[in-house]
Image (cartoon, rainbow, N blue to C red):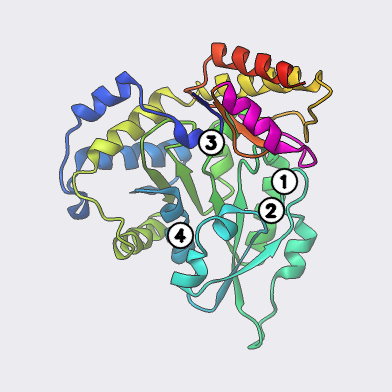
Amino acid sequence: MIDLRSDTVTKPTAEMLQVMHTADTGDDVYGEDPTVNELERFAAKLTGKEAAVFAPTGTQSNLIGLLTHCQRGHEYIVGHGAHTYMYEGGGAAVLGGIQPCPLPFCEDGSLALDEVERAIKPDDAHFAITRLLCLENTQGGKVLPMEYLERYSELAQRKGLRRHLDGARVFNAAVALSLPVERICAHFDTVSICLSKGLACPAGSLLVGDEESIRSARRWRKMLGGGMRQSGILAAAGLFALKNNVSRLQEDHNKAGRVAEALSALPAFKLQEDPQTNMVMLSPDMAIEPLTEHLYGDDIKISGTRWVFHQDVSDAHVDHLIASCRRFT
């Protein structure tokens, strides 16, 4: 079965399983797991940050980032379709008392900075205190331009606001831009990085940032139940991924490009735009149910109009997918 629902469905390779099997472990809550410590040091250096903390999920690494920056009665400005607002259970509001201020995403995945500035609240007891600006990169497979990040960062710093990036796929963005990931991370105080999407780990995420923020995040992680024991078994997969799987993401981008090019020549298909990374986005106007049934009959799983390419989708799978789409036409 070819699974295009998400890059979270990837499975560890034999090489990754081997390093997990032989990982040196200890109690991470005591700070004594050597493999977790090595992963955190490596990730901090790779992203140009002072420190990192390993968390079991991306939802938790985002949440501990928000809790680190905000207190009860604070507000964060965020995209109306962003994961930290829409798809993570409302954790910031429910568990942190942090009010979201959602704004519409622009077509390129950014937030319009004039709208962001207007949304920042004055110092008035009627309002929640605006404390944090959140972005997502990539957003729907789209890469935020570096020039935009510079202007976003300047606005946040001028207004005295903290900056958090949901960088679940930030390495896809870095590969697409042919830039070191630290160039993107430099515009944020904290960045959440998912290891279990395109990087193909079985679990785990990282929050990177300055020493003070990560010290606070580590306390929040414990409070939220994310303090693990011999988690070096999972951290070993993360280390392997960061050292071996980053450049490989270009293969996923290329597969998405191949499929998009083929679909654009078929009258039954309409794309939102050409893919920038590993996602093919069909037009929301398409009748997706008959297509879903047709593809499932050819052993292909999709979830709506977003098709995500990853390590477990081979070139032969791409050929099969294109042939199936041609038969649907």
Q: In the displayed structure, would residue 212 be above or below residue 326? A: below
Q: Are marks 1 and 2 in contact (CB under 8 Å)?
A: yes
Badge 4, how many Cα within 10 Å: few under 14, some, many 20+?
Answer: many
Badge 2, how many Cα within 10 Å: few under 14, some, many 20+?
Answer: many
Q: CA distance from mark 1 to mark 2?
A: 6 Å
Q: CA distance from mark 3 to mark 2?
A: 29 Å
Q: CA distance from mark 4 to mark 3?
A: 21 Å
The magenta stretch is 278-298
Front of the two marks 4 and 1: 4
Badge 3, how many Cα within 10 Å: few under 14, some, many 20+?
Answer: some
- In reply to whether residue 294 is colored magenta, the answer given is yes
Instruction: Find disc 3 in the rendering and name its residue.
Output: 6
11 vs 115, left or right, is left
96 vs 26, left or right, is right
Instruction: Find disc 4 in the rendering and name its residue.
Output: 63
- In reply to whether residue 75 is colored magenta, the answer given is no
Residue 108 is situated, as x and y percent measured from the top left of the image, at: 75, 43
Residue 279 visible (yes or no): no
